[in-house]
Structure formats: structure tokens, C-alpha cells
């Protein structure tokens, strides 16, 4: 998400008379001084959710939730680790989906054994098997290509182990080093939900060692903070209806139907009825998925803030806030990087990012506020500006793990070939962008 700096609109705030600002593509201004208008829904900046009413609801809800979580967690950081009922609901829905899948397969076998007419038997059998296959649990696969081999990059593994020790979780033994994934992440894979740490090199290379520790601690923090999106038992509920939306034609079913209607004379009435039913099913699935996501997201938001508090404990306030502020302007930083890669190699990317961030420093608070303009209930991450200001509102701490500069130097040496790959990948993207 690119956060272009908001610009003054030339008007003044009705509440405090200071100048108001707006994002480039938006006509809904807000006041940076008293925050008037910051909570006004703007369909131009928030992802479209099918209707204006729903969009406004999702924006208002998320806005309130972020304010509430920030003040709750600032007063009582321990509240971050508490479990809510949403996770249980999702595990329940997931169990029902898995049972339904099993029931389809059992039903298929039973139907096959009946003495119904062969074509009927065959038809019902095929439908049940397909439905059973569609509903079966699916697991995230690790991209083999970038998976670190066992014993590979021992210094990086040592760093991950030290941070995991501080966080209080076993270090993930599956590590993916990706030359072209922008961010860092922790995902779960397989039936047992083994954690996989994904290190996206472009961001990694734009972070100082202290910030890298903060981001790693944040990701490993997800393994101890009951994040529903990282619980494999909630997987089926999270995915199945979104998959169903794709299977019934993807997003905007009615717009598509309208286009088809324009050409209706070419296709018969029967085809149009099927298309109408598909669009209807699509809308129902999309609504169910939005409802499920609305149940998960408050917990997931809390988990993001909780992971930031883990980062603060391990890497300290300054490094965590600096890393979050870097995420705030990631759009600008990557745009700049794409421009610079022709003449500057990975060893310079941190200096370049530092320089660009310094240029944006005087607009830091404004940029933080701007991150709230594009986030609603269904966006997986709370606004990075809110996250930075939560960490800042807590007492300053130095962090429990000091930066070991020598270790980081060894890591940079051992990852040298990967860094070159990342350089090539971004040069490639640049060609692609023209
Ligand atoms: Zn104002
Ligand atoms: Zn996170």
C-alpha cells in the first residue's frame, strides 16, 4: 500500500480552524491538528466491499477498534495475549466444514451402492466427490525453491534462535529466503501447522540490524500470541468461502452478469438462468466470508499489536518504532529502490532507505495518520501508524537482546548470493515496469 504524503486542500478545519489535508486521490479531508474528519469514510481510499453501506460500517468499526485496542493495550499490555471467543467459533466452523467434507465422501460411497438408475447414481456420486474434495482441508505449501536447506545459513539461524529464545518460542526450522517477497512473515504449513519464517530480502536490506531484530521478534511473536490467522485449526473457515467466490467467477458477480445480459441474445435463456444462480451463489459466499472475516479480524488486530509489544520487549522501543515507521513509507522506499537499483547494489540499500526516510521525517505524524485512511475491518493489518504510536505511548525500553554487530556482518556475508538474487529480481521488476 503506497502512502503518498497527504497535501493541504486550501480549506480550514471547522473544529479548530487549522488547515486540513487530503490524500491525492481523495476528496475527504481531515485535520492533522485535532483529527477532525479522520474517521470519515471515503470509498476512494478504503477497499471496496460490495456496497457503500458495508464499506462505511467496516471503516467505522475498524476505526473504533483501533482506538480501543490502542488505549486498552497502552494501559495494560498484558491484555494482548488474552484469548477471545472468536477463535473458538472459527475452530467450530472449521470442524463443521471438515465433517461436511467427510460426509460427502461417505455419501458418495453409499450412493454408489444403491440400486438407483446408473446415470442418476453416477451424477450424484460425481457431485458428492467434487464437493467433498472442495471442502477438504488444505494446507499452505512452502515454496521449495527458496527454502533454506538444513544447516544452511548458520549465522542467520543463530540470530533467529536468539530472538526465539527471548520471545519464548522454539525457533522455526523452516526458513524461506525470498529475493522478491517484499515483507517478512510467519506462516503455518502442513497438517501439524509447522511454522515457516519467510524473509523477504528487499525489506530486510532496507532495515538496520536493530530494526531487523524488531521485525523478526514481531514475526516470531505471532507464534506466542494466539493469532487466529496463524492457527491451522481455523484454516478451513478462513478459506473455503473465499475459494467458493473464486469458483463461482470471482468478485463483482453482478457487474459481470450485467455485461452478459447485454449479449444475452447470443446465449439462451437456460444459460442466463445458470449465470444468475452463479452470481447469487457468489454473493452469498462472499457475504459469509466477510462475516467470518469480521469475526476473526478483531482478534487478528489484537495479535498484530501484541506482536509489536513482543518486538518492543526484545528489540527495544526505538528500533521497533523505527521499523514501523519504515513500514509506513514502504511504498515510497520501494519506488525509490526501483529507481536506484541500476547504480546501487544491496550493500547501499540501507543507506538509501535511511536517506529517504529522513526526508519524510518532518511529515511523520501526518504519514502515520494517513495509514488510517485506507484500513477497514477486513484488511489483515491494523494501520502501521497506529502500531507505531502504541509502542511510543509505552515507557521507553532498551530491549532485552543487544545487537551483535559481528553476527550481522557474518549474516550479510553468508547471504551474499541471495542478496545478488534480490538485486537481479528488482532489476527484472524494473524492466517489467518499463
Ligand atoms: Zn482541527
Ligand atoms: Zn504481524
Image (tube, rainbow, N blue to C red):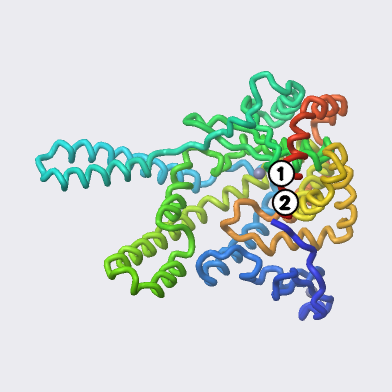
Q: What is the secondary structure assignment of the residue under circle 1?
A: helix
Disc 2, disc 1: CB below 8 Å?
Answer: yes
Q: Is 27 located above or below residue 193 in the figure? A: below
Distance from mark 1 CB to nearest ligand 2 atom below 8 Å: yes
Quadrant hosting residue 3: bottom right
Residue at the (27%, 46%) spot, across then down: 127
Q: Is 264 located above or below residue 112 in the figure? A: below
Q: Which residue is mark 1?
A: 308
Q: Is 241 located above or below residue 278 in the figure? A: above
Quadrant hosting residue 379: bottom right
Residue 274's spot in the image, x, y percent?
A: 31, 63
Label annotation for residue 77: none
Residue at the (57%, 33%) spot, across then down: 142
Residue nearest the observer in this picture, 181 or 421: 421
Work out how far the residue at label 2 is from the one at label 1, CA to CA, in angstroms.
Answer: 7 Å
Give the mark nearest the N terminus, 2 or 1: 1
Label annotation for residue 387: 2
Residue 253's spot in the image, x, y percent?
A: 44, 64
Amino acid at each position: 500500500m503506497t502512502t503518498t504524503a497527504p497535501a493541504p486542500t486550501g480549506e480550514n478545519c471547522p473544529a479548530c480552524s487549522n488547515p486540513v489535508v487530503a490524500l491525492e486521490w481523495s476528496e475527504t479531508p481531515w485535520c492533522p491538528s485535532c483529527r477532525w474528519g479522520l474517521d470519515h469514510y471515503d470509498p476512494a481510499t478504503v477497499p471496496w466491499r460490495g456496497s457503500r453501506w458495508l464499506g462505511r460500517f467496516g471503516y467505522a468499526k475498524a476505526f473504533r477498534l483501533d482506538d480501543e485496542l490502542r488505549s486498552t493495550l497502552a494501559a495494560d499490555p498484558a491484555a494482548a495475549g488474552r484469548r477471545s471467543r472468536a477463535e473458538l467459533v472459527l475452530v467450530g466452523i472449521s470442524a463443521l466444514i471438515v465433517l461436511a467434507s467427510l460426509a460427502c465422501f461417505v455419501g458418495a460411497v453409499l450412493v454408489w451402492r444403491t440400486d438407483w438408475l446408473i446415470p442418476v447414481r453416477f451424477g450424484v456420486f460425481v457431485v458428492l466427490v467434487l464437493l467433498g474434495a472442495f471442502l477438504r482441508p488444505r494446507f499452505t505449501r512452502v515454496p521449495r525453491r527458496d527454502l533454506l536447506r538444513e544447516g544452511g545459513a548458520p549465522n542467520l539461524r543463530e540470530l533467529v534462535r536468539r530472538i526465539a529464545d527471548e520471545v519464548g518460542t522454539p525457533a522455526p526450522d523452516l526458513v524461506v529466503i525470498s529475493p522478491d517477497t517484499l515483507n517478512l512473515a510467519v506462516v503455518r504449513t502442513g497438517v501439524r501447522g509447522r511454522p515457516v519464517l519467510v524473509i523477504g530480502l528487499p525489506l530486510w536490506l532496507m532495515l538496520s540490524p536493530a530494526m531487523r531484530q524488531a521485525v523478526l521478534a514481531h514475526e516470531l511473536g505471532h507464534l506466542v500470541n494466539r493469532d487466529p490467522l496463524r492457527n491451522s485449526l481455523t484454516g478451513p473457515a478462513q478459506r473455503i468461502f473465499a475459494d467458493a467466490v473464486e469458483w463461482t467467477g470471482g468478485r463483482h458477480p453482478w457487474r459481470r452478469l450485467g455485461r452478459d445480459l447485454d449479449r444475452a441474445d447470443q446465449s439462451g435463456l437456460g444459460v442466463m438462468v445458470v449465470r444468475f444462480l452463479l452470481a447469487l451463489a457468489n454473493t452469498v459466499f462472499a457475504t459469509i466470508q466477510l462475516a467470518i472475516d469480521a469475526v476473526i479480524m478483531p482478534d487478528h488486530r489484537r495479535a498484530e499489536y501484541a506482536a509489536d509489544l513482543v518486538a518492543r520487549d526484545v528489540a527495544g522501543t526505538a528500533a521497533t518504532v523505527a521499523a514501523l515507521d519504515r513500514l509506513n513509507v514502504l511504498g515510497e522506499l520501494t519506488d525509490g529502490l526501483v529507481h536506484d537499483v541500476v547504480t546501487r547494489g544491496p550493500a547501499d540499500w540501507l543507506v538509501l532507505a535511511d536517506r529517504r526516510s529522513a526526508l519524510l521525517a518532518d511529515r511523520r505524524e501526518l504519514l502515520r495518520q494517513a495509514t488510517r485512511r485506507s484500513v477497514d475491518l477486513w484488511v489483515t493489518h491494523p494501520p502501521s501508524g497506529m502500531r507505531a504510536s502504541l509502542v511510543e505511548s509505552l515507557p521507553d525500553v532498551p530491549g532485552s537482546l543487544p545487537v551483535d554487530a559481528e553476527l550481522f556482518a557474518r549474516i550479510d556475508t553468508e547471504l551474499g548470493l541471495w542478496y545478488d538474487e534480490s538485486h537481479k529480481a528488482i532489476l527484472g521488476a524494473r524492466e517489467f515496469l518499463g
